[in-house]
Each structure stands twice: as structure tokens, then as C-alpha cells.
Image (spheres, helix red, strand yellow):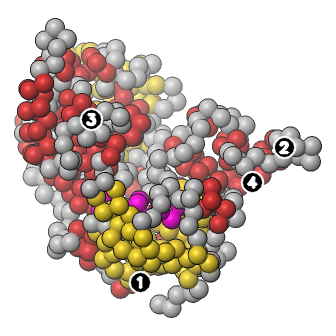
Amino acid sequence: MSRGKIILSMKGIVKEFPGVRALKGVDFSVAEGEVHALMGENGAGKSTLIKVLTGFYQKDGGSIEFDGRDINPRTVLEAQEEGISTIYQELNLVPFQTVYENMYLGRELMTRYRTIDRKRMISECGHILADLGIHVDVTRPLSDYGTAVQQMVAIGRAISVNAKLVIMDEPTSSLDTKEVEVLFGVIRKLKARNIAVIFISHRLDEIFEICERITILRDGALTGSVDIHEIDQRQLISAMIGKEAKQLERTKKGYLLEQAQVLARMEGIRQGTRLNGLGIEIRKGEVVGLAGLLGAGRTELAKVLFGAAVPDKGTVYWMGKECRFRCPADAIASEMGFCTEDRKVEGILPHLSVSENLTVALLPKISRFGVIPRKRQAEIVDSYIKSLGIKTPGQGQAIRTLSGGNQQKVLLARWMCTDPKLIIMDEPTRGIDVGAKGEIEALIRELSEKGISILMISSEMAELERNCDRVVVIRDGRKMGELLGDEIRQDVIMEMIAGGGEDNE
């Protein structure tokens, strides 16, 4: 496939941190109007390369040519002024400001009297979001809307600055299927306007749908760049992980559900307009999946079970007895754990160490009179670092410096060390690479085989198909049906979500 004019050329990029060479002479180029995937496992150097390009980091070697001239941005603002705009996976928005204020944050429109022109900002913000298929009241605080709308606001802000190159880092991680199609429509519009897009995602199906070219990094070095039609998914995975890829397959053995103890049961759960008489049952050692689009009520139902939300009506049974957890601490004391969807905000304690993050839920059990037995704590942490293959320089390393996959392993270990009966996993593989995804899925199977129950929420139908004994399909806070064993197939799940199943309210 012939490429157009090269708008970005990075040659021999080197970036070093104390004791680590993060980028080892990387070459990377993008053509005008090209949708270019930047691929690699967590820790491969993708984010570092982007941060060098956008002025967040300063390169230690190499050159950057953009739109025909050498550049060396020292700040993110300098990169934006050159025509390089970035949408990060962790949205850099201000939730308590309005939607339109977030759209124009730091570049407010002014009247001729040098006052902020709020009327024009409101009007233009509405038009920008409408082009993205989002129709909301832009004068309301951003926090009034869900993650998907916030993601679209970030995208709108990025493309509204007349960028020549837009970098999208995991832009679909918080979007449902319909919203992903809207985003892809936006990307195609950018391409038609000859704007280049660097697309970073761990969802391989998306890469092969929207991208034209792929550049692969591994351990800070360039593995290669190819046109999309020159490589398939298995070859791509092999290039990323450096060994022959094994397909993620359904290896879950049929569980004797009728003989297993009912661990948790929820009946007639109602909560405002989000939950409309939902009910589920979870048996010992069973992996139960919750399928549905964003806003269907999956996370809301899980939070009711965990005591993080109070239902208006309905009954929760735990170990055969009716219960009402007043707060998550009650659920934890009853041997339940919750790996949250947003590990950055609600999961990890970013400035604390791996050790502190891993044992935070266990401390009430092992401490005596408020004193933490450090030796015992260190032994526990070390055992989980080894058994789960957590890649960290040491127990005292700040967890925020670890890759997404390793952070997720620490969160899993946090609950595993409490000897739980049930772990709720909300989007357990979101934003982690395919190698780490396989390891997380293997851990889920291992926990299930040990008799630990899993309630798994996932937007990836293939993930539910591979790992679940039973899948409950939810739409608009209602249960559309259940699938068991070999009935669990992506096409059947999607048909139920679309309305092909029975409403079992």
C-alpha cells in the first residue's frame, strides 16, 4: 500500500531513566491522513514514545520532524501549538466544571472586550459534540455524565484545535459498541480531512478494523512496521510478546452447577431507573458473567451486592441467609472482594507501595492492637509477587510506576490474600496488553478451580465466552436472559442485548 506524504518522522529516539533505557533508538513515521496503530505489551515503550513526541518527556537522543521541519517540544502546550493533540486513557478533565468549560479549558474564547465569551463557547461546544453524535446539556457539570460522555468531550476538545495529528491512547476503553462506531466515524472524518491518527489500543479487532498500518515495539525497541493486510492477529501477538502466540481459548471445564452450593442470590433488585427488578444467583466456584452495554446496570448491581450502594427494593442472600451489607467493609468481613472497573481512581492507592496496596484489605486480620507485623506482611507480599508473576523492582515500589497489567495483578492479590469466597471483577482486563490478559484469565480459572466464585463484568463478549460458566444478559436494568455452558456465544449474547431474549423481570 502506497503511503502519502510523511507528516511525522521520529528517528533514533532514545529515552533513559535512572537504571532503565526505556527507548532504544526507535524509528517511527506517520503519513498524512493515515490511521496508524502503535502496538506493544505494557512496558514496551509506547507511552514513553508518545510522551517524548508531545513534550511531556525530553528525548535523550534522536530527532523529530513534523510537517516538514525539525521540532523539539518542551511542553504539551508547545506540541499542541505545532498541531499535535493527544487524548489520554486517563482523562485529564475537571469533573466539577461544565462540559463547555472543559472543552475550552486553557484556551477560552474571548469577546472583543477581553471577557470570556461563554455564549459562543456553549454554542460551539454543542456543535462539536453533536458532530460526535453526543447531545447533552453542555452547561451542566461534566461529573453529571458517565465516562463515555466524558471520553467524547476529551475527543471533541482534541479535534477542535485544528490538529494535524491526533493521538488516541485507549480511546475506546470506556465506550460501548455503538459509541465505538461513533468514534470510528469521527476517525474516518479526520482521515477525510487529511488529519493523521496514532491509535493505541489493546483491542485487536479494533486495530484491524480502523487502522491501515501498524508499528510494533518490544522492550523499548522497534520490532517492525507493516501495512495492516500484511499481518494477522496471531502474528501481531507473536511480534509483541516475542514468542509464538497461543490463542486465548475457552479452557473452562464444565462445572457441576446443580451440585454446587448457592453462595449469593439477589432477587428483585430495584434502584431508581438503573435497576428494574434484577436478580442473579452465584454458586460456589462458578464464574458468572454480566453482559450488557454501558449503562445497562451491570456495575450498579455489583455495587449493591458489595454494599457500595443501597437498593430501593429487593433482597440479597449471602450463604443462604438474607443480608444487607451497609458498606463495603461489611462485605469484605463476609469474605467478598471487588476489583473495580476504574483501577486508577477507585482501585490502586497510587502513591503507596506495592506492599501497602496488596495488603490493605488484609491488615485488620493480621495486625495486633494496631501494630502491623512487618515480617509477616513482607512474606505474604513476596509470595504473591512470585506466584502471580508481578513485575516490580521491589515491594516498596510505588504502584503507580507499574504497568496496567501488573497493577491489576496487585489488585487481584489484594483480595486473594484475604481468602475470599467471592471476587467481583469489573472489566478485569481493560487497558492491559494481550499477554497480561491471558495471565489474568488464567488466574480467574485457577481461582474458580479452587472453589472461589467470580462475578465477572466485561464489555468483551469473547472474554465472557472463554471464561464464564454462566452469563446473565442485562439491558436497561432488566435481565434479558441467561446462557449456560456451550450456549455462551458472542452472537447469542449480542442478540439478547439487542432485544432477542426474554425479559425476566
Secondary structure state at the residue bearing disc 3: loop
Which residue occupies the foreground of this view, 73 or 463? Answer: 73
Q: Is the Cβ of the residue at disc 2 closer than 8 Å to that at disc 4? A: no
Residue sitting at x 18%, y 24%: 362
Q: Amino acid at mark 2?
A: Asp
Q: Amino acid at mark 4?
A: His
- Image coordinates for residue 391, horizontal then vertical, percent: 20, 50
Is residue 40 something one can see in this rendering? no
Q: Is residue 290 left or right of residue 101?
A: left
Q: Tell me the tag on residue 127.
A: 4
Give the mark toward the camera: 2 or 4. Answer: 2
The residue indicated by pointer 2 is: 117
The residue indicated by pointer 3 is: 353
**Mark pair 1, 2: CA separation:** 46 Å
**Mark pair 2, 4: CA separation:** 16 Å
Give the mark toward the camera: 1 or 2. Answer: 2
Residue sitting at x 75%, y 54%: 127
Which residue occupies the foreground of this view, 430 or 135? Answer: 430
